[in-house]
Image (tube, helix red, strand yellow):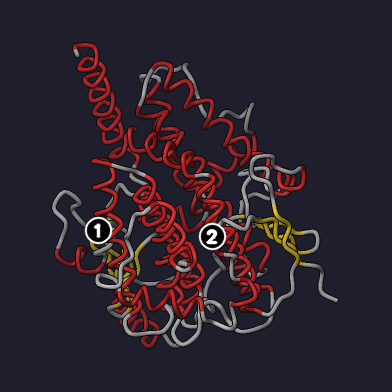
Amino acid sequence: MSPPVKIIGHYASPYSHRVEMALQLKGVPYELIQEDLSNKSELLLAKNPVHKKVPVLLHGDLAICESLVIVEYIDEAFDGPSILPADPYDRAMARFWTNFIDTKFSQPIWLAYWSEGEAQKAVVKETKENLALLEAQLNGKRFFGGDTPGYLDIAACMLGPWIGVLEEVTGVTLVNGNEFPALCQWAKEYSSSEALEPCHPDRDRLVAYFTENKEKYKMMAKTMLQQ
Amino acid sequence: MDHHLEQQAAESEKKAVKLLGMWASPYVLQVRWALAMKGVEYEYVEEDLRSKSAQLLAYNPVHKKVPVLVYHGRPIAESQVILEFIDDAWNHRGDPILPRDPYRRAMARFWARFKQDKLSPPIWRWFTTEGEEQEAAYEAAVEQLLVLEKELAVSGKPFFGGEKVGFVDLSLSPLAYVIPIYEEIVTGGGGGGVKMVTEEKMPSLAAWMGRFLSSPAVRGHLPPLEKLRPRCQAMREAFLVSARAKVEQQQQQ
């Protein structure tokens, strides 16, 4: 019998969601342990002493940290449909773009939603340039991975459920249908995907979470842009 | 395979694999060592990063950086991505760069990211600042180095990759040769002064540094230390001058 699989995660974290998506696509049952990020558990601190962050995958006695590292582990450790492509060059492209999302894309878009005034203009411009690059990667396909979601779709999950929520809570519109029709269509494909349905986040819960943290995030963005 | 066929195969491989690089870049060096581990022949193109070539901009429009590996005309950028590609594409040849076991592969990827996210920033800050800011950066860097020290000590292996050089060793490679240069420059070249990796505090890491530099793949292509020293020195000076100018400006306002 296969050792049990658990995720230490958080419902509002797209990084945590990546791991759920990967397990869902692989057909691996799991238990989700919701972490209280304002009061981190002994379990989290023990299993991720280096970063003390979610998500952490627990597979029997093994603990794996960092969401994209976890996703590649899931692809390699379990049988089921492949998450990464088979061809080495295609794998390299998938890794390049997921790396792009984590190192170049994530921070500016976060700042673009939560900042204001003059400082916001530069990050909005940068975000739109980044969005255009991702828009181009879709290139007429349903998903970045082709007909079915793959590694880059998992990495880009914040462009699914989170964008609508952030745009509602902040009043900032970035991913509009005129400039980014393929990304908007992708978000729809994502929401209506049967394969991913069981782990879809609860939209109302996300709205409540981001509304509750609005002032905190706005303050954080202001501080970060001042440096 | 007879000698003639081997030669032909090597020549045609050289045409198929091109590396755009720059002599001072540790990321480029990692790729060269990985290609050496797999015995891959390639054409090397030195880029002038102050005046980037049309080729580089075409092959890496997103980041406009080196290294870029061009495989049968198709470009791959980002050193970690390239290292994994080399391991995938020449899977059947040479030593594995990443372990085969999924959990050990995950750990290798985790430690490579640790270096980028947690270790490089304080080391860079330590090298480019002075005074209190530098002291704080030093403490932060040492804290993270001790995490690595523990990891290596607990494994009891000569390399992070086990018995041989692997993905994590390649990712950590700047530690092996850049830190001693930084230490010399920061302490003004004097004998004493503050070292970051000492045999007392970090015996496993200290031993690893020498072992890494004399390993087969690395030995064949050592980093150009004499050229690097003045370059690093100039970088530190430029940062310090700029920081001092900012402080002066702020004091005048």
- Is B146 situated left or right of A58 in this image? left
Mark sitting on residue A14: 2
Chain letter of disc 2 in the image: A
- The residue shown at (37%, 20%) is B130
Percent across and percent down for residue B162 are 65, 56
Chain letter of disc 1 in the image: B
Percent across and percent down for residue B106 are 62, 61
> Residue type at mark 1?
Lys
In this view, the residue in front, A25 or A62, is A25
Where B53 falls versus B196 (above or below)?
below
Q: Secondary structure at mark 1?
A: loop
Percent across and percent down for residue A134 are 34, 69
* Residue position for label 1: B64
- The residue shown at (65%, 72%) is A23
Residue A29 location, quadrant: bottom right
| Mark 1 on the same chain as mark 2 | no
Q: Quadrant of the C terminus of chain B?
A: top left
